[in-house]
Image: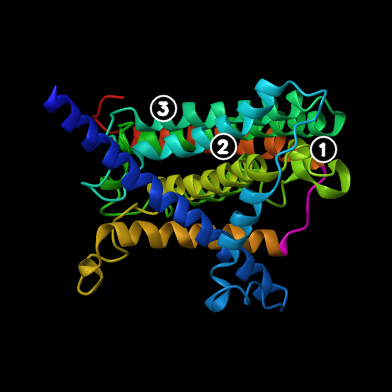
Amino acid sequence: MFEYLLVLGQEVYKILFMLVPILVSVAMVVWLDRRVWGLVQKRKGPNVVGPFGLLQTLADALKYIFKEIIIPASANKAVFILAPIVTMTLALVAWAVIPMSEDFVLSDINVGVLYLFAVSSLGVYGIIMGGWASNSKYPFLGAIRSAAQMVSYEVSIGIIIINVLLCVGSLNLKDIVLAQKELWYVIPLFPMFVIFFISALAETNRPPFDLPEAEAELVAGYQTEYSGMMYAMFWLGEYANILLMCAIGAILFLGGWLPIIDIFPFNLVPAPIWMILKIIFLFFLFALVKAIVPRYRYDQLMRLGWKILLPFSLIYLVLTASFLFYFDKLPKGNF
């Protein structure tokens, strides 16, 4: 019994050791997001609460905690409450298989890619539940938009991941990183990296693809009827998903925790630091796009996904497979 409790305590410790930094990182990237927008638009951004405005996100979190949670009288209360919990939980459990270094990963499973794809696909349920349970036309329209958008761009992301798997021969995320010791896949698969970045923007409802929550059209989309901490849980899940997409992009294309150049002094930097720097770099690009690119119309969004990105991804997949087969470069690993 004592040994069982000891093992359970170790597992809980590992989970907390992963979750606490993620929650702190969400607060920091929100600050970074706002600072980037301010710099691009020649504003100061957050600069009052705490040094350099670093405590602004904490102040916002406290505001949400103390705000009253209002549940509409006509809403399905059980589903209404469950929706933000589902969204936040799915965004956090996906981090279980993300390796920050060769030895630092919560769960090193051989099908890590499939796990990530399954969990990210389930994320749409939280949004649909929130929009439907509100019993209001604006949240419902926002939820329908989001469902169609996320399903559409998940197809492109799936094909992009297949390009990488063809080069590696394994579904293990560690193997994908270690296969890039000689050459990061961002170089031979650069078009796929660009499409992955665009698809990740659409998958996480980031501008210019934030149609499910477009203020001018749908008030606040599927979140319209939410307030207080329940609204903050949607917001937390969204930013955790953005960081997750940045981490997946770093693993698939930027060599994960591997240094830029394996020579002194680059190889002295700890592996998790390299991983964090690459995640921050990709998030900086996310923030830059939000500050620069105007919002798409919904028909333009769907046309881009189905008529441009999907056919191009399929063509590039055929070219990648043909190249690897012709030059006998197909990996010998077992999928």
Q: Which residue in the structure is indicated by mark 2?
A: 313
At x 39%, y 49%, the residue is 20
Question: Which marked residue is nearer to the observer: mark 2 or mark 3?
Answer: 3
Q: Is residue 117 left or right of residue 256?
A: right
The quarter of the rendered structure image containing the N terminus is top left
Q: Please tell me how crowded label 1 is: few (under 14), some (14-19), or many (20+) other residues with Cα within 10 Å.
A: few
Q: Disc 2 residue type?
A: Ser
Q: Is residue 260 magenta?
A: no
Stretch in magenta: 292-297
Q: How far is the residue under mark 3 from the one under mark 1?
A: 30 Å
The quarter of the rendered structure image containing the C terminus is top left
Dot 3 or dot 1: first in sequence order is 3
Image quarter of residue 269 = bottom left
Q: Disc 1 residue type?
A: Asp
Q: How far is the residue under mark 2 from the one under mark 1?
A: 20 Å
Q: Please tell me how crowded label 3 is: few (under 14), some (14-19), or many (20+) other residues with Cα within 10 Å.
A: some
Q: Please tell me how crowded label 2 is: few (under 14), some (14-19), or many (20+) other residues with Cα within 10 Å.
A: many
Residue 163 seen: no
Q: How far is the residue under mark 2 from the one under mark 3?
A: 19 Å
Q: Between residues 272 and 265, which one lies in front from this camera angle?
A: 272
The location of residue 318, given as percent across then percent down, is 49, 32
The location of residue 106, given as percent across then percent down, is 29, 39
The location of residue 157, given as percent across then percent down, is 54, 36
Q: Which residue in the structure is indicated by mark 3?
A: 114
- Does dot 1 land on a helix, a strand or a loop? helix
Q: Between residues 72 and 311, which one lies in front from this camera angle?
A: 72
Residue 115 seen: yes
Dot 2 or dot 3: first in sequence order is 3
Q: In the displayed structure, would residue 193 be above or below residue 97?
A: below
Q: Which residue in the structure is indicated by mark 1?
A: 299
